[in-house]
Image (cartoon, rainbow, N blue to C red):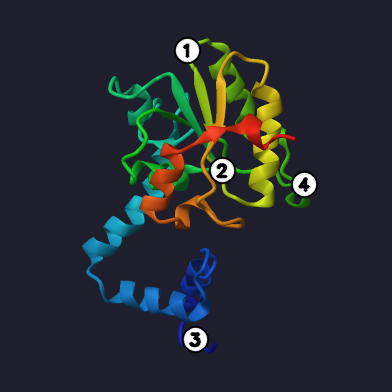
Amino acid sequence: MNFSSKLLEQAVEEFGKLPGVGKKTALRLVLHLLKQSDADVSRFTTSLDRLKSDIKYCKTCFNISDHDVCEICSSVKRDRHIVCVVEDTRDVMAIENTNQFNGLYHVLGGLISPMEGVGPADLKIEGLIDRVRSGEIQEVILALSATMEGDTTIFYLYRKLRDFQIQISTIARGISFGGELEYVDEITLGRSIATRIPYERNVG
């Protein structure tokens, strides 16, 4: 791809680093920005700057937040006896959109994946153990993607949590193997949460 401007080329290269954005899409986005007013572009760049500098992670559940404790964890309307364990913020958003869950969350920040060099120490697992150890939690729902990495993480968490006097459950497998939560339709995901089953049934 030949560029008439080095600045244009550099901008396209940066946009092209985003997931799912190819060179042609990156060029279309950059050209779109060039057509916008200075005020619009300034708002866009300022929002990106603030996203990196001002964003926080909830000290309790590790979800992305504007405050030290997110709105879900600080809400008095949530059931504080149930914690739903998810991979990342996208899964929190997907489950919240179902309107089928009123408990709290715990965001692991990834899944155990030896092939990618991600081990238990790289995830927010100890934070989950500390929350369970506090005694307030009565049920942990392991709502992770139906993939090899998801199942590996679920089994590891089950072994870490099984000695606590709590119920450990997983979402019902209305989700096909290999499916990720963020791509599951809201009705299927909502039913999977509502019809969760004890994880012990899956352990041989």
Mark 1 and 2 residues: CB-CB less than 8 Å, in contact? Answer: no
Foreground: disc 4 or disc 1 = 1
- What percent of the width, then of the height, locates residue 106? 50, 31
Residue 53 seen in render: yes
Q: Quadrant of the C terminus?
A: top right
The picture places residue 154, in percent across and down from the top left corner, at 64, 37
Residue pointed to by mark 4:
114
1 or 2: tag closer to the N-terminus? 1
Task: Check disc 2 and report the residue beneath it.
Answer: 144
What element does badge 1 sit on? loop
Residue bearing the label numbered 1: 136
Q: Is residue 48 above or below residue 60?
A: below
Instruction: Give the secondary structure at mark 2.
Output: loop
Residue picked out by circle 3: 3
Of circles 3 and 1, the one toward us is 1
Front label number (2 vs 4): 2
Foreground residue among 29 and 129: 129
